[in-house]
Image: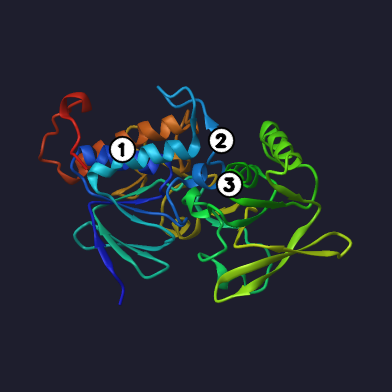
Amino acid sequence: MSQTVDTDIAVIGAGPAGLFFVFEAGMLKLRCTVIDSLEAAGGQCAALYPEKPIYDIPGLPRIAAQGLVDNLLEQAQPFAPRYLFDQQVTALAREPGGGFVLTTAKGMRVTCRAVVIAAGAGAFGPNRPPIPELAAYEGKSVFYLVKRREDFRGKRVVIAGGGDSAVDWALSLSEIAQVMVVHRRPKFRAAPESAAKLERLAKDGALELVIPYQPEAIEGRDGRLEAVIVKDLDGRTRRLAADVFLPFFGLAATLGPIAQWGIGFERNLIKVDPATLATDQPGIYAIGDIATYPGKLKLILNGFAEGAMAAHAIYGRLFPDTPLHFEYSTTKGVPKS
């Protein structure tokens, strides 16, 4: 039997814009349920470049992407949002009273009075390597993103990939785990500074570079990994004893069912009123990278501002006869979590 969650606002997307919207809505005493297709909060920041520094967040001259996500989660926590991770919204229907019912691929139902789409470039899913029986290990010893670094302490970790995510996590996990990095060529696509550090660690024996190889198969039972089999271009294979396999081959983004909801689009972006972030469908709003209007800049700080504007617009829609006395957080404060 499907489970139903009732909330004021359903937020589709747990990236920075969606997370900050939860805070702004909470300040107006509006409850939020956040739905994301990934396994954890953060969107691209957490999934693709968690350890990369961000320099253009006001008041924070430098902060790692994952650090920003952690701060946003802490900031929203006093308002007790509900998070539904690893859930893609597959359907949206209007109720007679003006509300909405959202249904996920796993059968969850979310009833709400307004919808905010903060989906970035769309729903993300991992690019899975073509390895037989891989699905049986997913979520147990095969992962496409790292939720908690500490979960890998003392483990034998095989990382496959040559981009920022693979290199960043190799650098980080090498401090607490035995790390082997599998890549099909000597050159990495990560930031030059990170790639150089990776090579230095390999020379010092802090991790192993398995080059040029690609993952071919896995060994284990009952979801517990024992080894990753890799193969080079000449067909020679190696068996890498492993407890964990992290294939980082990027994420595929798609608008998915959102494109079928009758919302006005422009070049795969949702057109909104820049004053309210409302779409052309009453009760549905869009913020962050997926929203477009004249002069739009795709910056995290713009997503934050759009979240605040959308929250106030939604309050006015839900409570048209209740004047909103605007107060700054310095005078209003926030609830204790």
Determine whether the residue tagged by mark 1 lies in a helix, strand or loop.
Answer: helix
- Which residue in the protein does label 1 denote? 75
Q: Is residue 100 above or below residue 314?
A: below
Which numbered tag is attached to residue 173?
3
- Look at the image and tell me in which quarter the N terminus lies: bottom left
Q: What x and y, as percent, mark residue 179?
A: 65, 51
Q: Local crowd at mark 3 within 10 Å, few (<14), some, or many (≥20)?
A: many
Q: CA distance from mark 1 to mark 3?
A: 27 Å
Residue 279, which numbered label? Answer: none
Residue 305: x and y in percent read 36, 31
Q: Amino acid at mark 1?
A: Gln
What's the residue at 47%, 50% (across, down)? 148
Residue pointed to by mark 2: 52
Asked whether the beta carbons under mark 1 and mark 3 sit within 8 Å of each other, the answer is no
**Which callout, 3 or 2, points to the residue nearer the camera?**
3
Question: Residue 6 falls in which quadrant of the image?
Answer: bottom left
